[in-house]
Amino acid sequence: MAASDAGTRRATRQLALALASVRAAGTDHPTADQVCRRVRRTLPTVSLGTVYRNLQRLVSDGRIGVAQVGSRVTRYDPTPTPHDHFVCRSCGRIEDLPAGPSAASIRALRRAGHEVTEHATVVYGRCRACRDGS
Amino acid sequence: MAASDAGTRRATRQLALALASVRAAGTDHPTADQVCRRVRRTLPTVSLGTVYRNLQRLVSDGRIGVAQVGSRVTRYDPTPTPHDHFVCRSCGRIEDLPAGPSAASIRALRRAGHEVTEHATVVYGRCRACRDGS
DNA sequence: CTCGGTGCAAAGGGTTTGCATACAT
DNA sequence: ATGTATGCAAACCCTTTGCACCGAG
């Protein structure tokens, strides 16, 4: 069962709300702190430590992902399957990209004897809203 | 002049050694701590804070770069021009890649009205040495 | 009843910063 | 002489962890 094995885990309110919060955030790719704030709207006593623990668990259970966007703070991603991102340099908005395999480089690496397992691409720029704004 | 303007800056031994250390590291993409250790081989009194300040400055002057490899610690890159990386999941080695433009996604973003300035791709796997080893 | 989850608060690791001093110009 | 860069140490930020209590099973 591996990643999807809930094993001997208990279904707590805190865990459910953390998952719901990451999903509810939509395209926001929230930080642990943002998830915590949102969970507190329903369960005001939740602690940040618990939120971190639950997010970690959701990631290792493959229920959510972490977005590799070269940010210092961890951004959680409602979509657990690998895909790329667009990051707006102005507002920080992170949008999903429909996965772009840079086939040529990967072929070259394999020819060199390396084993390629995954790859993450981050595209940076200014989103339409920010361009329109200024 | 912008990024390459050394302005009213002083040429200190600490700055020169930081730059030399990042360059000497070759394919290592060293952390600030590693740079500090190396600088100390020549200048034992250098402080980590100074190394951080000098690395920051070298980056903003466009003399070195930072590798966006989804690691929590900052990895400095002797090559300041944008390019992609290969990261070995076993030994952590970071190798340069000759830039892989995921042309399709970028075209789609532009069509959506976003302005694309750069993109960073990280390819993960196990390098040849690690495969041979085990 | 059990033992995994929680809340709290402290510890940890990486990076930044305030301040007095040293030194490049 | 002038004021930037340094060294030191404390502060910061994000994240993890130890511990006693709570509550899902």
Image (cartoon, coloured by chain):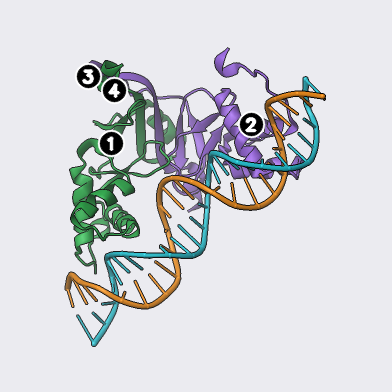
Chain colours: A purple, B green, C orange, D cyan
Q: Nearer the viewer, mark 3 or mark 1?
A: 3
The residue tagged 2 is: A23
The Cα atoms of the two marked residues, 2 and 4, are separated by 35 Å
The CA distance from mark 2 to mark 3 is 40 Å
The residue to which callout 3 is attached is A112
**Kind of residue at disc 2:** Arg
Secondary structure, mark 1, is loop
Q: CA distance from mark 3 to mark 4?
A: 9 Å
Is residue A98 rendered to the left or right of residue B49?
right
**Badge 3 local density, few (<14 within 10 Å), some, or many (20+)?**
few
Question: Residue B83's mark?
Answer: 1
For the view shown, which residue lies furthest in the top direction?
A1
Between label 2 and label 4, give the one nearer the viewer. Answer: 4
Marked residue chain, label 2: A
Q: Quadrant of residue B52?
A: bottom left
Q: Which label sits on residue A73?
A: none
In this rendering, do the residues under marks 2 and 4 share a single chain? no
Identify the element where label 4 is drawn: loop
Q: Label 4: which residue?
A: B127
At 20% from the left edge and 52% from the top edge, which residue is drawn? B41
